[in-house]
């Protein structure tokens, strides 16, 4: 798999000469393909031929002489029994890259700004000084070209590791932890448990208050709970129908002036 280190090894072994920033970026493209296991079977003028993808051999490998003969670049690569055509076109300050395999699938495409990755250096053989942000450029080439042309290059993420990490992360918080299930039965006297006993968990012990059902207040002595209607007890006595209420059977107070209650009359007369 290509990375900045393997790409730089390919560049040093090839010892290319660069004319400008576009040359440097185009050669990083070629080195990324070589570092990923592709073989160069045509470059430069031969790769620009109309039937280059068909006529180029699938076996062997050729040199890259004349790869930067023009202001545009072309390479034909082979990997296994498949061949791939890569062309680079300079438009203003960008280098547009298209890559196509002989299977005829939709081409992969990327646009690169050479000034972001190429640098000036007084020593031509110092290839480390010829580039900047090389790791970013190689990574972009992988994501937009190499992985799309050859899906086997794309690293496979470990599902078991990711699932275990996600489980650890979910269990790290309070709400992600598993609560132990109590082994003892519920407290008797809870509201709705079907028990005849009224316990501390019964809502009837602490009625809800007004428009705030979550506010619990203890009942006040002599005050009925909210929502309970109080009806006074009926009068004591026989019910003989209208006009015979218990009040007519009460002893009426004396009507004679100066007299007292009949039960006290004899005391008054005896005293008088």
Image (spheres, rainbow, N blue to C red):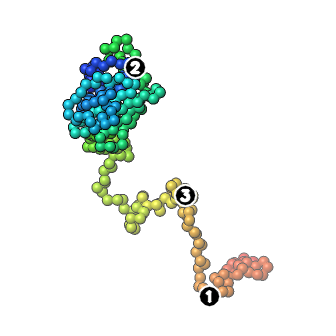
Residue 209 badge: 3
Residue 6 badge: none
From the viewer's side, name the closer residue of 31 and 168. 31
The residue positioned 28% from the left and 55% from the top of the image is: 183
Image-quadrant location for residue 169:
top left
The percent coordinates of residue 167 (x first, y second) are 31, 44
Discs 2/3, front: 2
Residue 20 badge: 2
The first of marks 2 and 1 along the sequence is 2
From the viewer's side, name the closer residue of 216 and 50. 50
Q: Secondary structure at mark 2?
A: loop
**Cα–Cα gap, marks 1 and 3:** 44 Å
The percent coordinates of residue 25 (x first, y second) are 37, 25
**Cα–Cα gap, marks 2 and 3:** 83 Å
**Cα–Cα gap, marks 2 and 1:** 123 Å
The residue positioned 54% from the left and 58% from the top of the image is: 209
Residue that carries the numbered disc 1 in the rendered image: 240
Asked whether residue 26 appears in the rendered view, the answer is: yes
The percent coordinates of residue 198 (x first, y second) are 42, 63
78 relative position to 112: left or right: left
The percent coordinates of residue 179 (x first, y second) are 33, 49
141 relative position to 223: left or right: left
59 relative position to 146: left or right: left
């Amino acid at each position: 798999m290509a990375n900045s280190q393997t790409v730089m090894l390919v560049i040093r072994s090839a010892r290319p000469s660069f004319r400008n920033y576009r040359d440097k970026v185009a050669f990083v493209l070629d080195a990324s393909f070589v570092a990923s296991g592709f073989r160069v079977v045509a470059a430069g003028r031969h790769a620009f031929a109309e039937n280059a993808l068909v006529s180029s051999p699938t076996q062997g490998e050729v040199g890259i002489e004349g790869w930067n003969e023009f202001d545009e670049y072309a390479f034909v690569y082979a990997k296994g029994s498949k061949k791939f055509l890569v062309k680079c076109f300079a438009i203003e300050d960008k280098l547009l890259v298209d890559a196509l395999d002989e299977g005829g699938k939709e081409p992969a495409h990327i646009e690169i700004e050479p000034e972001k990755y190429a640098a000036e250096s007084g020593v031509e053989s110092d290839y480390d000084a010829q580039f900047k942000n090389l790791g970013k450029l190689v990574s972009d080439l992988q994501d937009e070209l190499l992985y799309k042309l050859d899906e086997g290059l794309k690293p496979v993420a470990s599902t078991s590791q990711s699932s275990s990490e996600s489980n650890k992360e979910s269990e790290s918080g309070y709400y992600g932890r598993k609560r132990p299930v109590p082994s003892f039965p519920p407290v008797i006297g809870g509201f709705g448990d079907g028990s005849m006993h009224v316990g501390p968990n019964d809502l009837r012990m602490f009625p809800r208050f007004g428009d705030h059902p979550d506010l619990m207040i203890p009942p006040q002595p002599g005050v009925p709970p909210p929502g309970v209607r109080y009806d006074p007890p009926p009068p004591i006595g026989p019910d003989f129908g209208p006009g015979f209420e218990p009040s007519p059977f009460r002893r009426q107070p004396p009507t004679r002036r100066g007299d007292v209650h009949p039960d006290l009359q004899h005391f008054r007369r005896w005293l008088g």
